[in-house]
Image: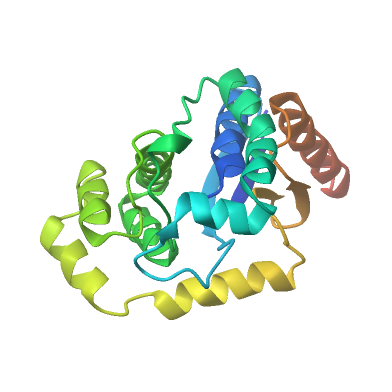
Amino acid sequence: MTTPSLTIDVVSDVMCPWCYIGKRRLETALADVAGEINVEVRWRPYQLDATLPKSGKDRQQYLEDKFGGAEGATQAYAAIRTAGADENIPFAFDKIPVSANTLDAHRLIRWASSLGLEAQDKMVEVLFKAYFEEGKNIGDDAVLIEAGEQVGLEKEVVERLLAGDADRDTITAEIDQARQMGVTGVPCFLIDMKYAVVGAQSAPALADAMRKVVLEKSKQEPDASA
């Protein structure tokens, strides 16, 4: 009997803490269905705020502006800290100097995919850790070049690509496509590009969604024994 296969396109932004949490929950869900379903995971770009400058914006000021003051920002992040602790993510929000423009980070993730989907996934992981655990500015070229080297991208190549406009339009078009599909918040897990699981859902909910899609597909496929 052939093991059923699925694709999951994760629409995500690397400055989104819920996306990091969602990645951990997806990993748990994938471990749950391992051997039962073959799943190919692809990372797709999204920008929560494309208006941020290349240099970024002071993070505390950005959050206060977004949530209506320091108290609002603290309250908004209380649930994130709790969820992060549950997923063993050591969020270090106080270390983060700026809210970054993530367009170049998404370009880097795209270039990493040229080495395969495992390299792309590792690139996403490296950027999440750099930003949320190490407090690095993931809009900064030096940070991105170092991150690229960690997954096997050549330093000189990344330097040259970042200095130009390679794939800027492609990334912007993908983000526009996601919005046209109705994606208004991330993470969003698109299963087989037909079924959407919105938000950092629990690992059991993600595994359940995968199983339901596989079951639905099996009902639609013709019976080979007929």
The quarter of the rendered structure image containing the N terminus is: top right
Task: Depth check: give the residue in front, 18 or 71.
Answer: 71
Q: Quadrant of residue 131?
A: top left
Residue 173 vs 220, above or below: the answer is below
Image coloring type: rainbow
Quarter residue 80 falls in: top right
Q: How many numbered markers are drawn?
A: 0
Q: Is residue 2 visible?
A: no
Q: Quadrant of residue 24?
A: top right
- In this view, the residue farthest toward the left is 156
The image shows residue 88, relative to residue 62, as above or below, that is above
Q: Position of residue 197 (x, y in %)?
A: 76, 45
At x 48%, y 71%, the residue is: 171
| Residue drawn where x is 54% and y is 38% of the image | 20
> Where does residue 81 sit, x and y in percent of width and height?
60, 28
Measured as percent of width and height from the top left, residue 33 is found at 65, 24
| Residue positioned 48% across, 68% down in the render | 52
- Closer to the camera in the image, 58 or 69: 69
Asked whether 53 or 8 is in front, the reply is 53
Residue at 27% across, 54% down: 144
Is residue 56 visible in this depiction of the protein? yes
| Residue 99 % position (x, y) | 46, 55
Q: Quadrant of the C terminus?
A: top right
